[in-house]
Image (cartoon, grey):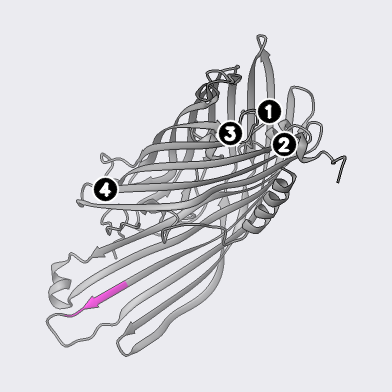
Amino acid sequence: MPHPIFRTLKHNLCSCGGYAAFCLCAVLCLCTPHARAQMSSLNIFSPYTMYGIGDMAVGGSAFNRSMGGVGIAVRDPHAFNYRNPASMSAIPRQSAIFNFAGEGKNIYARNASAGNSTTYNTFNIHDLGLAVPLGRGVGLGFSLTPVSSVGYTSRLVEQNQSVTENIGSTIYNYAGDGGITQVAMSLGVNLTPKLSLGVSMNYWFGDIERQYNAMVTSYLSSAVYRSVISTENQNLSKILFTLGAQYVFKVGRNNALAIGATYQPKVTASIRQTRLTMSYDNSGADTVFSAASRWNMDIPGKVAAGIYYQSDKLGVAFDYSRQNWEGAYAIPEGQNVALGVQQDYRLGFSYVPNRFDIRNALNRWTYKVGLRYSDSYLIKDGHQLRDAAVSLGVDFGLKKGTFSKVGIGLEYGERGSRAAGQVRERYFNIFAALSLFGNDYWFVRPKYN
């Protein structure tokens, strides 16, 4: 039976102390398996999510995404950095940081060989985090971020003339939804004024559901063919760890150069799977197959390194990461799909004209530009899937003299290649982020009641 990926797509168009306590409650309430907010029926829409755990998230906060998603070496005492747990040690004493961000995405996909296209819109929570200091040079952070997303609907009409003439119209429908979410607890410690180490305990959880439906309609005879529907649900629950380090060099009088690295060891996750296949017609439905099972999936080790230069006005960062998915899980036969090495390259720039300007607010804003490129772990017909994007954004303070800020970012990217016969996706992302920074007044005991 032919598989619809990279062939025919169905068209879809779908549309502060009190602050600290509130933020902590929000994190605890939202860190549940149902912590997805979305306007559409799917988290994402892409035929590339038909395998494994789907489309891997870029990672990092929405503030970092405007700079291409960098963050391995970034140390900012007034921002929550999810990319390296060692950065938690930069949080000042008697303060707290709360992050919240949403993401809107528009995807346009086209298969040149089949002449079909699809458009889809989604909105989701991008990240949620709370960071607090435990002492001088020690910081603790809690965060909720996406790991991967699955979302697709596609239809394939049988083109075999013999089948059409002797049996009738045969239509195959495929659909998938779900994803993996991460809840992380990160600890960072300053071993020396220049060297920081960190560790993060990450809990991955989520459900992925895939459906297959075959419908046959007879035109030339009175024969009745029963349709078939099959539903497969996979559940993942696993704890992983990430180790991180950052080292800062002083460059000149007021500038700094930081290097960073992270390592996520390989683990094996047990996937709980249930499958139900039924045949049905107008008279009713019968169960053909029903079973529950478990199978193992390797989550390969991941290494990442970065460098970050910062002056009073300019910030430049570059990240590289590598994760080898070869043999991580089995791919169904006959799909011409294989797993490979995923590599990500990210470059980001930030610029503040004059952060101390008390007259012109635009001079205090932070302007950001980013580039990223990745070789995906997915290989189709011997060609590795590639993804490239450019982003820009701006951060501005909620109030003069404070570090609480709002960030707005835009990203445009393309994935897939016509030359390789792949579905080419063009996507446009919009990020909106809020960061509340608690200063000393959050934790000062009042002298008068």
Seen at 65% across and 17% down, the residue is: 256
Q: Magenta stretch: residue 154 in it?
A: no
At mark 3, the secondary structure is strand
Q: Position of residue 173 (x, y in %)?
A: 31, 67
In this orientation, does residue 116 appear?
yes
Report crowding for label 4: few under 14, some 14 to 19, many 20 or more residues within 10 A (C-alpha): many
Q: Which residue is mark 3?
A: 304
Report crowding for label 3: few under 14, some 14 to 19, many 20 or more residues within 10 A (C-alpha): many
Q: Which residue is mark 4?
A: 110
Q: CA distance from mark 3 to mark 2?
A: 14 Å
Of helix, strand and loop, which mostly describes the magenta segment? strand
Q: The residue under label 4 is which amino acid type? A: Arg
At mark 2, the secondary structure is strand
Q: CA distance from mark 4 to mark 3?
A: 33 Å
Q: CA distance from mark 4 to mark 1?
A: 42 Å
Q: CA distance from mark 1 to mark 2?
A: 9 Å
- Position above or below: 247 against 243: above
Bounds of the magenta span?
214-218
Task: Tell which circle, 1 or 3, labels the residue nearer the N-terminal end.
Answer: 1
Tell me, yes or no, whether the two marked residues, 1 and 2, touch with CB atoms within 8 Å.
Answer: yes
Q: The residue under label 2 is which amino acid type? A: Gly
Residue 246's disc number: 1
Task: Tell which circle, 4 or 3, labels the residue nearer the N-terminal end.
Answer: 4
Q: Quadrant of residue 444?
A: top right
